[in-house]
Image: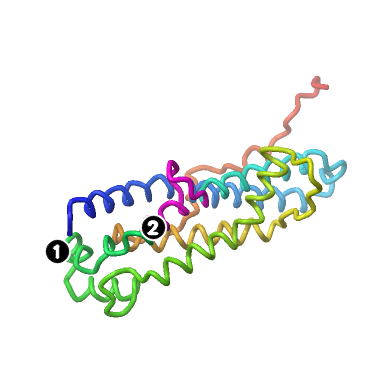
Amino acid sequence: MSNIDDELYKKWDEWLDVLGHQVVDLYTQRHIYNRVRQILKENPKVQQPDDFFFWVSVWYSSSMAIAIRRLADKDKGSISFGTLLEEVKINPRVISRTRFKRLFVDGNYREFLADADFDRYVGVKNEYISLSDVQNEIDDLILKTTKLRRYVNKRVAHHDKKEFNDIPRYSDLEEAIDFLGSLYKRYFLIIKCLDPGDLLPHWGYDWQNVFRYPWLNVHDH
């Protein structure tokens, strides 16, 4: 294992911290949006007119599509899953069973446990991460985010002169978010030998309190 490989591994480890914050934010925003939608649905008095929820939905769909495009970006100057996967594809031997055991085996985490976990994360008896697995992840990332990327490019960041009818559905957002979450969990396990756990934060307070009180004073217009 060369010094260059060590530096790449360290960089990917640091990138996962950055990507993790963004993935958790996606899960958080999705949870809040779905809960607000449910609150409004259960209260007929605030359903009409629907200007407020329309505004919330436009903001949510646009901001989430932009965030997903950023995480799928393959620009070499950006920290993204697209860039991470391309680097792993070019340097697959950086992720090795030997390195995994050297970094994590200790008195509590025995070698046979490390081998079993590496089998589960990377493949039974594989010494290195599978190139075909990484390529499949790259292909899936493109497949699950292309429609959102086009939408951002043609209707959010810019308004293309050409007609654009391929508007993504909320299910496209859901699928992309879930896939990014699965990618993050997989590489977090492989590179950090830790389970990131639930990607949705646990609030120490009731963020829904804002809906429990009147928003306008009686004298407001």
Which quadrant of the rendered structure holds the N terminus?
bottom left
User: Mark 2 vs mark 1: which is more N-terminal?
Assistant: 1
Report the disc number at residue 196. 2
Q: Residue at x 29, y 57 (%)?
A: 192
Q: Nearer the viewer, residue 176 or 26?
A: 176
Q: Which residue is mark 1?
A: 106
State the scheme by which the image is colored.
rainbow
Q: Nearer the viewer, residue 115 or 134?
A: 134
Mark 1 surroundings: few (<14), some (14-19) or many (≥20) residues within 10 A = few
Report the disc number at residue 145. none
Taking the image as shown, residue 168 lies to the left or right of residue 22, namely right
Element type at marker 2?
loop
Element type at marker 1?
loop
Question: Where's residue 156, x and y in %?
Answer: 69, 40
Magenta span includes 86:
yes
Please count the marks in the image. 2
Magenta span includes 43:
no
Q: Residue at x 73, y 33 (%)?
A: 214
For marks 2 and 1, give the CA distance: 20 Å
Question: Based on the displayed image, in which of its 4 quarters is residue 155 positioned?
Answer: top right
Outermost residue, bottom side: 124
Q: Nearer the viewer, residue 215 or 73?
A: 73
Taking the image as shown, residue 31 lies to the left or right of residue 156, namely left
Report the amino acid beneath label 2. Answer: Pro
Report the amino acid beneath label 1. Answer: Asp
Q: Residue at x 23, y 71 (%)?
A: 114
Above or below: residue 163 compared with residue 108: above
Q: Nearer the viewer, residue 185 or 73?
A: 73
